Amino acid sequence: MSLGAWQTDARKEFCHPVNVQILKKLIYILPFLLILSSCMDDDVLRDFERLNANHTERGVFVVNEGNFMYENASLSYYNINDNIFENNVFYRTNALPLGDVAQSMTIRDSLGYIVINNSGKIYIININTFKYIGKITGFTSPRNIVFISDEKAYVSDLYSKCLYIVNLKTRQIAGSVDLSATGSVYAHTSESMVVSGDKLFVSSWNFDDKILVVNTINDEITDTLDVTLQPNSMVIDKNNKLWVLCDGGNETSPVGYENPTLIRINPETLEIEKTLTFDDINGSPTDLCMTAGKDTLYFIFSNWGGTAIEGSGVYRMAVTSEVLPSSPVIPENGKLFYSMGIDPINSDIYVGDASNYSSNGRVLRFRHDCILIYEFEAGIAPGGFCFK
C-alpha cells in the first residue's frame, strides 16, 4: 500500500463515530496519564515483556555509551562459550532505560556496577539474571569504580574535583577525597584507578598531567606524580610495575598538547623508571590493557579526532621491551576502534568499533594471536568491556 492510500484509509477509520467517542474519552484521561508517568522513578520497574535470563556461563558485558544527552545508553551481553550475543539486556530485563552515557562496568562478587556518566549514578545488577538490584546516586560525572573491600569503593569523577568514597552496604556516598587543593583551574579530575597494596593510583586526565596517590586506609593524598599530559589508562604488570598511557592532549586543549607517552612507574618507590615517547604528536593512544599473564601490553593508537591515520590500530608490546612497537598487530582498516578489553582467562582481544557514533557499532573478537574469530553488532558507541 502506498503512503497516500494508507493516509486516506487511516482518516476514514479515525473519523468513524465509535473512534471519535474513544478519542473524547482519551482527551479527558490524558492529563492523569501524564501525571502518573512523571511520578515514575528508577525504583518502580514497569510491566514489560522481560528477558528472563540466567547466564551462569562465562561471558562479557559490552557497555554502549549511546549519544550524549539522548538517554540511549545500553548494555549488551556475549556468551563466550556459545557465541550468542544479546543487545539491550538491561532494558529488556528491567523495562528501565540505562540512562545517558554509560561509561564503565565493574564486577564485585555476583553484582555488576554500571557507571552512568551523564546521569550521575551507578546501577547495580545481578550479573547472571541482569536484574536491577539497586543504585548509587549523587555523583556529578562518574567515570569508574574500584573496590577496596566488601564495604568500601572509590568512584572517579570528571568534574567534581573529588574522589567519591562509597559504602557498598548502604549504597550511598560516605565521603570524598578533595582533589582541588593544588594545580590549575582544570586540576584535578579523576579518571582511571589502580590499587597496589594500600595505595590507590588515580590518573588526572582532563587537561592535567598528574597521577595522584591516595592512602586507602585514611583516604588522604600522600603523593602527586608528574607525568605527561592527559594520562588516560593504567595497568599493573606481573612485576608489580605501574604502566601509564598518556595521550598528550590535542591542538584544541587550553593547556597545550605534546607527544603521547607510555610511562612505567615503581609503585613502591614512586620512581618513574621509563618514559617511551610516540613520534606522532597527532596520534592518541588509549585503552591500555594487560594480558592474562600480565606480561604483554595492548593499546589502541588512532587520531584524537576519530579519523583514521597511518598506522592506526591495536598495538602490542612486551613489558620487557625498551621501545614502542612500530606497527599495529590489528590494523584499523577503515573502522573506528573506540574501545578494547582483554579476556583475563585466555587473552582474547575484544575491540569496539564505534562506526559513525550515531548508529549501532560493532564488536570484533580476536584470538590472542590476533586472528578474527567473531564479529557482532552492539549498541551505539561500544565503549567498554566487563568479563565475568
Image (tube, rainbow, N blue to C red):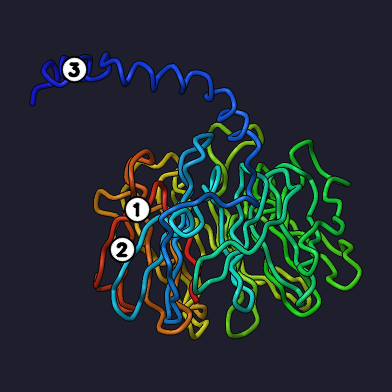
Indicate whether 344 appears above or below 106: below
- Contact between labelled residues 2 and 1, with CB atoms less than 8 Å apart: yes
Residue pointed to by mark 3: 7
Pinpoint residue 223: horizontal percent, then vertical percent. Answer: 84, 63
Between tags 1 and 3, which lies in front? 3
Pinpoint residue 218: horizontal percent, then vertical percent. Answer: 91, 69
Q: Residues within 10 Å of mark 3 (few under 14, many from 20)?
A: few
Q: Is residue 267 left or right of residue 96?
A: right
- Indicate which disc, 1 or 3, sits on the residue closer to the N terminus: 3
Indicate whether 241 appears above or below 301: below
Residue at x-position 34% and y-position 50%? 361
Q: Which mark is residue 364?
A: 2
Residue type, mark 2 in image: Leu
Would you say residue 57 is visible in this rendering? yes
Q: Nearer the viewer, residue 45 or 27?
A: 27
Residue at x-position 33% and y-position 47%? 360
User: Gap in Å between the C-alphas at discs 2 and 3?
Assistant: 43 Å
Q: Is residue 228 left or right of residue 352?
A: right
User: Gap in Å between the C-alphas at discs 1 and 3?
Assistant: 40 Å
Q: Secondary structure at mark 1?
A: strand
Pinpoint residue 109: horizontal percent, then vertical percent. Answer: 63, 79
- Contact between labelled residues 3 and 1, with CB atoms less than 8 Å apart: no
- Indicate which disc, 2 or 3, sits on the residue closer to the N terminus: 3
Q: Which mark is residue 353?
A: 1
Q: Quick one: quadrant of the N terminus?
A: top left
Pinpoint residue 197: horizontal percent, then vertical percent. Answer: 77, 80
